[in-house]
Image (spheres, rainbow, N blue to C red):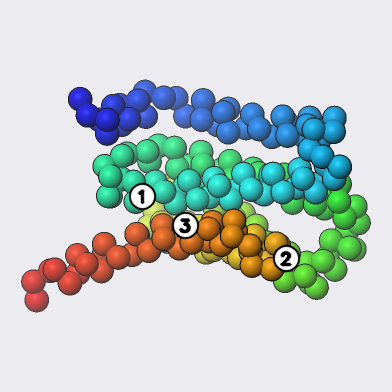
Amino acid sequence: MGVRDAINGGARKLPTWLVYLGLAVPAPWLFYLGATGGLGVEPIAALEHEYGALALKLLIAGLCITPLRRHVGLNLLKFRRALGLMAFFYVVLHLGVWAILDVQSLGRVWADIVKRPYITIGMAAFVLMLPLAATSYNAAVRWLGRRWVTLHRLTYLVAILAGVHFIWLRKGLQLEPLIYMGVILALLALRVVPRRAQRRNQPA
């Protein structure tokens, strides 16, 4: 048995609830660190960043599922929903820390959304995630049919907006957010290029 077969076999045996549990563990731990001084002199800002970074990483992990299956033969599709929902979970925490612990005013929240472009972009990504999270259960998949696939392509736009949000959040062009954006664009390109190549190779 090769490495790929071993990974696929292990993925089939791994319960999805363990993935949810494992991905949820950092949330209370990071909050504990923030409350006890473990996140430095600005714990609220650090906690906000950590939750946002986890959300972005999980979005990217979700984008990896299809390229891994197409190009490497790793079938991790059963975990895609968990990655998406946990990304949404950390986005909610990221937004909650910013709105409740940092800004602490509904008026200022709205003012920041309107006046600060990076926050506007971030909120746009969050709004687009709402229908994705709301239709992530099996009954919604059956009810929407092919429309479900079309709707969930919003994930691509969400990932791009999240990458732009991270770039604009950092003052000046810094390497880390640019790397994240590059990875997002590369993963999206891997979804498009093979399809175009297949169309070119089809007989006229």
Q: Position of residue 149 (x, y in %)?
A: 41, 56
Q: Which mark is residue 12?
A: none
Q: Quadrant of the N terminus?
A: top left
In contact (CB < 8 Å): disc 3 and disc 1: no
Q: Is 158 on the left-hand or right-hand side of 33?
A: left
Q: Which mark is residue 171?
A: 2
Helix, strand or loop at label 1? It is: helix
Report how far apart the C-alphas of labels 3 and 2 lie in the structure. Answer: 20 Å
| Residue tagged 1 | 66
Q: Quadrant of the C terminus?
A: bottom left
Q: Along the line of sight, which residue is nearer the eye, 157 or 181? A: 181
Q: Position of residue 98 (x, y in %)?
A: 80, 52
Helix, strand or loop at label 2? It is: loop
Q: Along the line of sight, which residue is nearer the eye, 186 or 13? A: 186
Q: Position of residue 92 (x, y in %)?
A: 70, 47
Residue appearing at x 54%, y 56% in the figure = 180
Q: Is 99 on the left-hand or right-hand side of 7?
A: right
Q: Is 169 on the left-hand or right-hand side of 130?
A: right
Three-letter amino acid code at the position of disc 3 = Val
- In the displayed structure, would residue 68 be above or below residue 105? above
Q: Residues within 10 Å of mark 2 (few under 14, many from 20)?
A: few
| Residue tagged 3 | 183
Earlier residue among tags 3 and 1: 1
Three-letter amino acid code at the position of disc 1 = Thr
Using the rendered image of the protein, determine whether residue 134 is visible from the camera's viewpoint.
no
Q: Is 39 on the left-hand or right-hand side of 74?
A: right
